Amino acid sequence: MASDARLKEDLPTLTDRIVSTYQKIGKINHLGHCPLPNYDVVISIIEDLKEIIYPGYQRREGLHMGNITYHVGDLIDSLHDKLTTQIARALRHDERVNAKKDPCNPLEETDFDAKGQAMAIEFLNRVPDLREVLATDVQAAYDGDPACANLDEVIFCYPGLEAITVYRVANTLYRLGVPFIPRMMTEWAHKQTGIDIHPGATIGGYFFIDHGTGVVIGQTCEIGEHVKLYQGVTLGALSFDTDNEGNIVRGIKRHPTIEDNVVIYANATVLGGRTTVGNHSVVGSSVWLTRSVDPHTTVLLEKPRLRLRSEAVGSIEEELNFQI
């Protein structure tokens, strides 16, 4: 009880101290009458879309061809409203951020709600295409994993598919020019799965991430079709170019190109915007690659030396060559 009384006594002073930092450290607070995209609503959009993309596997049970039209129509109507509002908020805030960067660029009189609605409708019109490409990703997971019993297991259980699904949704919004929201979506998937795919990456069909934890795919990465990655793979950038003032140069290709039918094994790292892994190539585990390789190439580390030591009395220390 004494501690409660002490807290009540100190609370006004503590509150004033915290609030005073909002002016002193203004970069990490948003105080104004212009609402930002709502994180919880953005995540609910993902969940609604998964209900449409994979009907019968998500929240609603008992779906069949007799009631699916009503169910999907209800979701589309709700998604239209959610997307319109959240995209409008993102567009409005993005314009204000850009205006702060350039004082000579005044805020334009833009109907953000109308623009947000147009983008929302265009996105929803692309949902059938999303289902088609995600069907290839589900098939790739089944074809690429002998431990997988059926396609249902992929949809229910595979974190790689979860990350790819959210990425493809976010990438569609990204290509439409929607700010903030695509990155919010993929970072949520990153937190859920341990797989970090930037929404700006370009990824072809039949894409499979096996196990998945620790995979990183950068913004300007280009991946062809029928590509398979294992856990811990990084498709990243080399050191960043800077301008005369020391600022990072943006808008250039920083991440590698992975052509069709490539397999990259666990913990391999492929770096650089000029690096291309040619089609039908294999990159072995723990490889560090910063140069291009021709098609039909296998890249492996040299054979390491494995040392076995036993604590048993009279044992002999043994060294073996271990073939990867």
Image: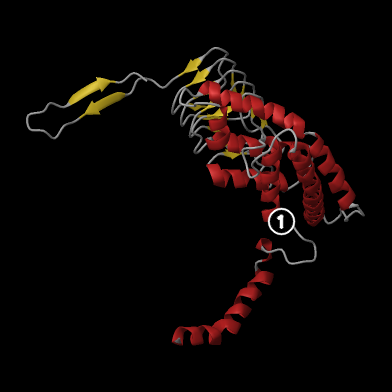
Q: Is residue 160 left or right of residue 309?
A: right
SS at mark 1 in the image = loop
How many other residues sit within 10 Å of disc 1, few (<14), some (14-19) or many (≥20)?
some
Q: Is residue 305 left or right of residue 128?
A: left
Tell me the quarter of the image containing the N terminus.
bottom left
**Residue drawn at (78%, 49%) of the image:** 78
Q: Name the residue rendered at 44%, 29% in the picture.
A: 286
Res 58 visible: yes
Amino acid type, label 1 = Asn
Image location of residue 319, percent across then percent down: 22, 23
Q: Quadrant of the C terminus?
A: top left
The residue sitting at 12% across, 26% down in the picture is: 316
Which residue is tagged 1?
Answer: 38
Q: Position of residue 99 (x, y in %)?
A: 82, 55
- Position in image of residue 34 (x %, y %): 80, 62
Residue that sits furthest to the right in the current view: 109
